[in-house]
Amino acid sequence: MSAPTTPSSSPATPPPSRPAVSEREAREVAEAAREQHWRKPSFAKELFLGRFRLDLIHPHPLPTDEAVQRGEAFLAKLRDFLETRVDGARIEREARIPDEVVDGLKELGALGMKIDPKYGGLGLTQVYYNKALALAGSASPAIGVLLSAHQSIGVPQPLKMFGTQEQKETFLPRCARTDISAFLLTEPDVGSDPARLATTAVPDGDDYVLDGVKLWTTNGVVADLLVVMARVPKGEGHKGGITAFVVEADSPGITVENRNAFMGLRGIENGVTRFHRVRVPAAHRIGEEGQGLKIALTTLNTGRLSLPASCVAAGKWCLKIAREWSEAREQWGKPIARHEAVGSKISFIAATTFALEAVTDLASQMADEDRNDIRIEGALAKLYASEMAWLMADELVQIRGGRGFETADSLRARGERGVPAEQLLRDLRINRIFEGSTEIMHLLIAREAVDAHLSVAGDLIDPDKSLSDKAKAGAGAGLFYAKWLPKLVAGPGHLPTSYGEFKHGVDLSGHLRYVERTARKLARSTFYGMSRWQGRMESKQGFLGRIVDIGAELFAMSAACVRAELLRSQGTNGREAYQLADAFCRQSRLRVEELFGRLWNNTDDLDRAVVKGVLAGTYTWLEEGVIDASADGPWIADTTPGPSEKENVHRPIR
């Protein structure tokens, strides 16, 4: 397909070059995009403040009977479709989902799982949407990504939350049945720092004119509709700022210049998309000018939950393969599962899978109830699941030995069961980067975790504030900490009888007492860090990352215990659930204690010194003796606005 012709009309003013942004300005842009207020309670927020609000998650929230009936009915249809019409090995070999599979998903209604039935969707809850994604992703990770990118961050979710009634009536029926959507934010030189966004949307009459290049546009190669983030310049009648638009993917001036290929998820349709003088009606703007990042972040509060769902599916498959293989494979006279070195890995996989499902289902049900603010819970679920799933897949490869490193096709060719363990490892690796890398998630969650402190003491550590502002902040902080700090000394975690309802054969009450005590210790540690470093706290990313990781473990322990009690009360594998929760909590507590030790005893300062030397060229002698296999070319591709010089590889599936 040739590149589209350039539209004759042009913007009133030329698009500006990439904005030069200082570190402070970048922080201000990110801060402005945050939800500034907490209008609903948050279990995780309270946890970081040293308050263990078990009442916010226990008894475990449950879906309605109608939601269960609707969800289970769709899961049955989806399972039949995946088992009879999807060949995951073929998708991996050909690096493409066959068009007939996509058409079948459309006929099934899978594109509209979260869309309201009045717009032609299925109206599934977040819980059942996640279960469907997990099921689809287990058949082919590429299918899971296709469906998730379309509904979790593509057109349906932003319009559901921020769209006008006219926009919903126009686009949601299409998204529910026929049209695939994509989300376009990242640029070749812009990742997690959106303040440097270069794609522009210049007002011109009743339209905006888009210019720029977007990278890693999942679904972008086959998309019919796009959510595009672009910078609107300030001007008369225009507030300006980063703004969200719904854009028809076949609009003149749009060119998909490349279909990207990756180490994993080989079947996804991910590309590079160039916009050259693309006209978008003002009626297709989502929200107001300048609200784009806020819309993106708010969408991700629940959108991120699709990724933990895929991690749960990965854990379940790892456990199944580990069990079957470890029973069949014998070494030194007994199955390898009976050897402690292997058995400990299987125990880790089983316990962690139970915990990840507990975290994902709890956060998803909380999202469905809309009773709590889950911005931290959703972020913690994404962070924790992506890291732990990768570890589980790595352990599975180790359990399988050389067969874990061998491809499924090669195993089949020599007469053995084709187990794609190495593919799982490759496919899962991106989850630590997707929708906020682990490092960015640490900072995002840390910012929310210290929000209460910054609300009362932020001006004290802001170098730009006046002495009078600091004095006022000091008085307010004094009142806050006079009430807060004494509450961190003792609590229910010191009482042997606390949480007694979690003692049924296996005693989980001790783990919940540990969570309560440790939450207070975590809050004290955060306060000590702020007192020690004050305005430099934000640069202590190692410290903040460990604080967040401790909070993630405490959240997972809480979710695991609550889920175990739910299953016991329902008469569904309650004894076994208690055993798994107990195993997970004991494993988790070891990790927590290690993290606490590294809060104050670490190599962070030495690491910074080494990095300084590396960047200064001090250690270039260490790089000698190898051949750099990298191909020539710039580190970052040129994104100068202008018409495309490449063939358009856009391939809508009709």
Image: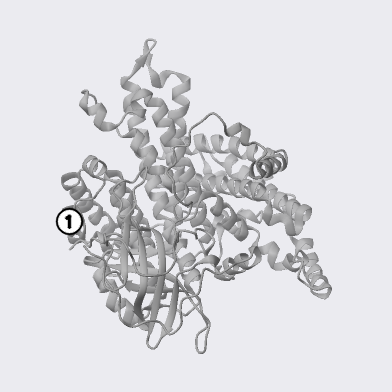
Say left or right for 430 vs 99. right
Q: Label 1 belongs to which residue?
A: 104
Compared to residue 161, the image places residue 583 above or below, namely: above
Say left or right for 52 vs 490. left
Q: Amino acid at mark 1?
A: Gly
If the image is split into quadrants, where does the C terminus sit? bottom left
Compared to residue 625, the image places residue 16 above or below, namely: below
The residue lying at 67 percent from left, 56 percent from top is 538
Compared to residue 624, the image places residue 33 above or below, namely: below
Give percent across and percent down for residue 295: 46, 70
Q: What kind of element bears circle 1?
A: helix
Say left or right for 474 vs 98. right
Q: Quadrant of residue 157?
A: bottom left
Give percent across and percent down for residue 208: 39, 80
The residue lying at 58 percent from left, 71 percent from top is 32
Give percent across and percent down for residue 173: 25, 72
The residue lying at 50 percent from left, 51 percent from top is 437
Task: Depth check: give the residue in front, 467 or 53.
Answer: 467
Observer able to see residue 565: no
Task: Depth check: give the residue in front, 323 or 149.
Answer: 149
If the image is split into quadrants, where does the N terminus sit? bottom left
Task: Depth check: give the residue in front, 354 or 616.
Answer: 616
